[in-house]
Image (cartoon, rainbow, N blue to C red):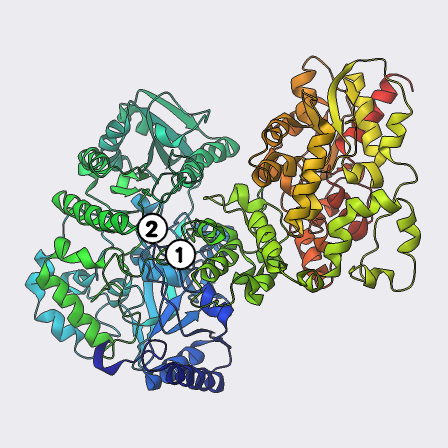
């Protein structure tokens, strides 16, 4: 490190390092008002961003204001400790990781200071999430132009650091094009206001620029709208206004720390129209993109057919351009000029959203390669990684570049599916690098060098959106030459002579194959599974969610990284590595983070890479409480609610009396804010056993624990409807249980025994199995075959599972449900969203005249979760995300629907409403129609 910079985590003996860290932490706590956190959890959560790299920090600070930032810099300077500014942590080059103190701006410095609609400007703090700025500007018909795909969680400070762009950059440019002035602090303690005319330049900078004007005028590639790599020193040329704010954008936190920014706002389109143009193949689409720019589209986004799996609504073709225009006349002009083989012009906002969703889903698909969702061995296919995510070439060269790029992938035996901002010549692609083995890492380096040569040969930039960080900075001499790269180093030294800000990034970088986050990680096991989290932080969306998504309810309730899917994955990753978290499966840091995981399974579907935190939690708890006397350390709720099916079978209605005894709830491990549901007077299975059916069985109805003991009216209603639809119903010969409560409390050995008994009870029974409780259906579909992979009966049963709506649609397609003709409200079960899907349910409601959408999200009760001590407040906050507002806003005569027992219980507890399974509503309609 430069000029004696000394990081306490890397230098000296263990005792010296511990003493240095303690002194640094104490100095920071004495100096700042914000939170100083040098705990194991804080360090583990910030070892990684959304890149392939890992650096272990000394600790974190969440500054409250600019004075706190100044104090942090002063203390760190005195200790010789580097500082890294961090926003949403979604950088893909490694630039949001650091070995010193990490500044977390998202906690306190996340405000919108002011918004001036007349001047079309806003003053923002660095931790402000982009979508919050856009929401504030929207009432004035304004927005912030750059809109990266992480807009729901990326911060303005991070966008400035990386010079972020987005889909609308063909119209509104990069972040640098939309920044007017910046308030920054240097590592040396100077406070500067950066603007045009050389305003705010540190001493010596402008003299350095003046000595290299010829190099700055000739050293940068021309005709390249997406040049993000390196320092933008050409913005300091006299003919470009000596714009310090523009030159600072994209410096990746290596020059100064932003504490406030004034940004420009742009008018929203008054009549947005989406034009989708179909072309024969990717090359044709890429070559057409540049020719559309004179028609001033707002977006020119491209993707090919290998990213679209069964999507409907697209025009004919093998590749498509998504072009937004302002007004239908502009859209028609664009279509006439496009020379596409097919096109679609969409004015309807819902239709536009549906088509954009295909494009957005394709971006998520790009994180998985066609090899499947899991690897049989490292490097074997399935997972795709960043590293060469966003190279850019002049738009006119894009078609030729893509052909050669795909050939390069084939040459190296790699797979990746390009897509991206074709109008700007910027291509996104994630590639199935083998980053686990020495040979794979060598090939990663060889490919990186080869693709850098290819980009430069086409006059392009190694980074067209996300910055260089460690991933590409080593290769900048290929793009700029040694002389200009040396000037980058000289500029860094003027701004930061001590080298204290984000060392190892962009200037004098670490090698691109050093410090990979996979190094030392076991090739199999939970840590390997958690490593599939690439850190894009879709789970970190703030505030009430909208739409059907579920992930991540505990983060939205708490706002804490450790309670996000990404945070938990990072902790599991670090547990497996054993460097920061050193006590393995006994880790209290991991247990605490997983404690607020509701096992909603939302991440299984909503996470772009399919992280399955519910499954990870189950395995961790199973191992955490393993060993001699481990059962004594388990919470009482694991023995009571975790084994609820057993207790209900043994005691039945007797539990009603038992739970009324003094201290019963406390002894059962139930929070005092909750009352346990009452056990029904008669089980569903006993009712069914005493009735006779005139129809031969067509389906097996799974008598889950909740339906059998707690809500038998749902089972009776389902039988009524299924038989009215012409389907005879049978039950399994013996007692069955899916094992859900055992799985969710991490009692996997017991879960396997319960599941095997259920398989035995099913015997040789074949045909569809209708499961009324969504959480049980999801367990049978996913957990059963995953926990019993060697039992072929498990796979057969999983494949036979049908939801109530699926059974009616596929087995009784000609049956006409009763017309109920009333609005509905309520919630789609989170497990149904994540595992089962609700398309059949929506179609069934439509046929029955039940209008309106059900809320997404998670109800917050989540089986045993909402009953356990310490969870009540989070449980209520989860319900307030979507469910309770939907109930309060419903029409007075709306029917309240919830197929999940937990959802119905939560609605009764918190809103005082009686929610019903859709089978109950339909059964009432059948009875009315038949005059019963």
Task: Indicate whether 40 appears above or below 638.
Answer: below
Relative image position of residue 739 (x, y in whole percent): 69, 42
Q: Residues within 10 Å of mark 1 (few under 14, many from 20)?
A: some
Are discs 1 and 2 less than 8 Å apart at CB?
yes
- Tally of numbered discs: 2
- First in sequence, mark 1 or 2: give its number: 2
Relative image position of residue 207 (x, y in whole percent): 12, 75
For the residue pair 35 and 585, the one nearer the viewer reads as 585
650 with respect to 460 (left or right): right
For the residue pair 378 and 37, the one nearer the viewer reads as 378
Image point (41%, 27%), residue name: 345
Task: Indicate whether 167 appears above or below 239.
Answer: above
In the picture of the structure, the residue carrying the numbered disc 2 is 436
Place residue 628 in its image quadrant. bottom right
Place residue 291 in its image quadrant. top left
Task: Indicate whether 254 appears above or below 315.
Answer: below
Relative image position of residue 596 (x, y in whole percent): 63, 58
Q: Which secondary structure lies at badge 2?
A: loop
Q: Gap between marks 1 and 2, in whole Å?
A: 8 Å
In the picture of the structure, the residue carrying the numbered disc 1 is 521
């Amino acid at each position: 490190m430069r000029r004696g910079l000394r990081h306490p985590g890397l230098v000296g003996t263990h005792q010296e390092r511990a003493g240095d860290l303690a002194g640094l932490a104490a100095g920071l706590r004495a100096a700042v008002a914000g939170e100083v956190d040098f705990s194991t959890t804080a360090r583990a959560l910030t070892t990684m961003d959304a890149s392939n790299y890992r650096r272990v920090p000394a600790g974190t600070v969440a500054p409250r204001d600019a004075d706190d930032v100044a104090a942090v810099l002063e203390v760190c300077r005195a200790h010789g400790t580097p500082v890294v500014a961090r926003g949403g942590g979604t950088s893909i080059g490694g630039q949001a990781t650091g070995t010193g103190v990490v500044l977390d701006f998202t906690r306190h410095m996340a405000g919108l200071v002011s918004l001036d609609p007349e001047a079309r400007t806003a003053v923002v703090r660095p931790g402000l999430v982009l979508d919050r700025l856009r929401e504030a500007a929207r009432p004035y018909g304004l927005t912030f132009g750059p809109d990266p795909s992480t807009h729901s969680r990326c911060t303005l400070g991070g966008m400035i650091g990386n010079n972020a762009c987005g889909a609308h950059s063909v119209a509104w440019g990069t972040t640098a094009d939309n920044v007017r002035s910046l308030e920054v602090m240097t590592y040396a303690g100077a406070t500067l206001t950066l603007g045009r005319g050389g305003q705010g330049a540190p001493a010596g900078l402008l003299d350095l620029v003046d000595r290299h004007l010829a190099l700055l005028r000739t050293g940068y590639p021309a005709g390249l709208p997406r040049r993000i790599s390196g320092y933008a020193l050409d913005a300091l040329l006299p003919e470009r206004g000596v714009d310090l704010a523009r030159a600072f954008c994209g410096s990746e936190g290596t020059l100064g720390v932003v504490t406030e920014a004034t940004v420009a706002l742009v008018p929203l389109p008054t009549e947005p129209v989406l034009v989708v143009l179909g072309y024969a193949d990717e090359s044709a689409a890429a070559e057409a993109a540049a020719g559309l720019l004179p028609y001033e589209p707002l977006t020119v986004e491209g993707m090919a057919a290998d990213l679209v799996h069964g999507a409907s609504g697209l025009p004919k073709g093998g590749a498509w351009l998504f072009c937004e225009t302002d007004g239908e006349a502009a859209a028609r002009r664009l279509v006439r000029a496009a020379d596409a083989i097919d096109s679609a012009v969409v004015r309807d906002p819902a239709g536009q959203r549906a088509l954009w969703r295909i494009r957005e889903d394709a971006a998520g698909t790009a994180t998985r390669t066609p090899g499947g969702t899991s690897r049989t061995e490292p490097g074997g296919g399935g997972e795709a990684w960043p590293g060469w995510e966003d190279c850019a070439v002049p738009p006119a060269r894009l078609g030729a570049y893509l052909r050669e790029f795909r050939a390069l992938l084939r040459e190296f035996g790699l797979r990746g599916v390009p897509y991206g901002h074709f109008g700007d010549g910027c291509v996104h692609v994630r590639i199935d690098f083998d980053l686990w083995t020495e040979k794979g890492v060598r090939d990663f380096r060889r490919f990186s060098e080869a693709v850098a040569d290819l980009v430069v040969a086409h006059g392009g930039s190694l980074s067209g959106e996300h910055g260089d960080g460690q991933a590409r900075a080593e290769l900048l001499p290929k793009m700029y030459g040694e002389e200009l790269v040396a000037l980058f180093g000289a500029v860094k030294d003027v701004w930061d002579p001590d080298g204290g800000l984000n060392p190892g990034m962009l200037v004098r970088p670490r090698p691109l194959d050093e410090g990979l986050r996979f190094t030392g990680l076991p090739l199999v096991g939970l840590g390997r599974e958690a490593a599939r989290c690439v850190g894009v932080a879709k789970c970190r969306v703030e505030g009430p969610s909208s739409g059907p998504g579920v992930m991540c309810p505990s983060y939205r309730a708490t706002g804490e990284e450790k309670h996000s899917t990404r945070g938990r994955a990072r902790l599991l990753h670090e547990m497996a590595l054993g460097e920061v978290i050193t006590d393995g499966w006994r880790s209290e840091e991991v247990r605490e983070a997983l404690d607020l995981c509701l096992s909603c399974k939302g991440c299984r579907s909503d996470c772009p890479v399919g992280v399955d935190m519910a499954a990870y939690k189950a395995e961790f708890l199973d191992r955490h409480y393993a060993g001699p006397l481990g059962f004594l350390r388990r919470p009482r709720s694991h023995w009571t609610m975790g084994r609820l099916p057993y207790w209900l079978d043994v005691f039945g209605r007797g539990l009603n009396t038992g739970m009324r005894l003094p201290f019963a709830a406390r002894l059962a491990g139930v929070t005092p804010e909750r009352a346990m549901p009452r056990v029904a007077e008669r089980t569903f299975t006993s009712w069914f056993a005493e009735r006779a059916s005139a129809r031969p069985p067509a389906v097996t109805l799974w008598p889950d624990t909740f339906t059998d003991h707690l809500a038998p009216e749902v089972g009776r209603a389902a039988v009524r409807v299924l038989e009215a639809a012409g389907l005879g119903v049978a039950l399994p010969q013996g007692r069955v249980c899916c094992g859900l409560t055992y799985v969710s409390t991490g009692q996997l050995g017991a879960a396997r025994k319960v599941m095997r008994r259920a398989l035995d009870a099913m015997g040789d029974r074949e045909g569809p199995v209708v499961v009324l409780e969504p959480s049980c259906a999801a367990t049978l579909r996913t957990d059963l075959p995953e926990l019993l992979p060697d039992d072929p009966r498990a796979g057969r049963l999983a494949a036979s599972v049908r939801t109530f709506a699926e059974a009616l649609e596929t087995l009784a397609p000609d049956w006409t449900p009763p017309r109920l003709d009333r609005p509905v409200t309520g919630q789609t079960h989170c497990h149904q969203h994540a595992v089962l899907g609700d398309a059949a349910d929506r179609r069934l409601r439509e046929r029955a005249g039940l209008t309106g959408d059900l809320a997404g999200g998670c109800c917050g009760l989540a089986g045993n979760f909402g009953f356990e001590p310490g969870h009540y407040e989070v449980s209520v906050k989860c319900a307030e995300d979507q469910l309770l507002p939907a109930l309060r806003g419903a029409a007075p005569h709306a029917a309240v629907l919830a197929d999940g027992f937990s959802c119905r219980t939560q609605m009764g507890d918190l809103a005082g409403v009686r929610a019903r399974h859709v089978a109950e509503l339909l059964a009432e309609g059948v009875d009315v129609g038949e005059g019963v």
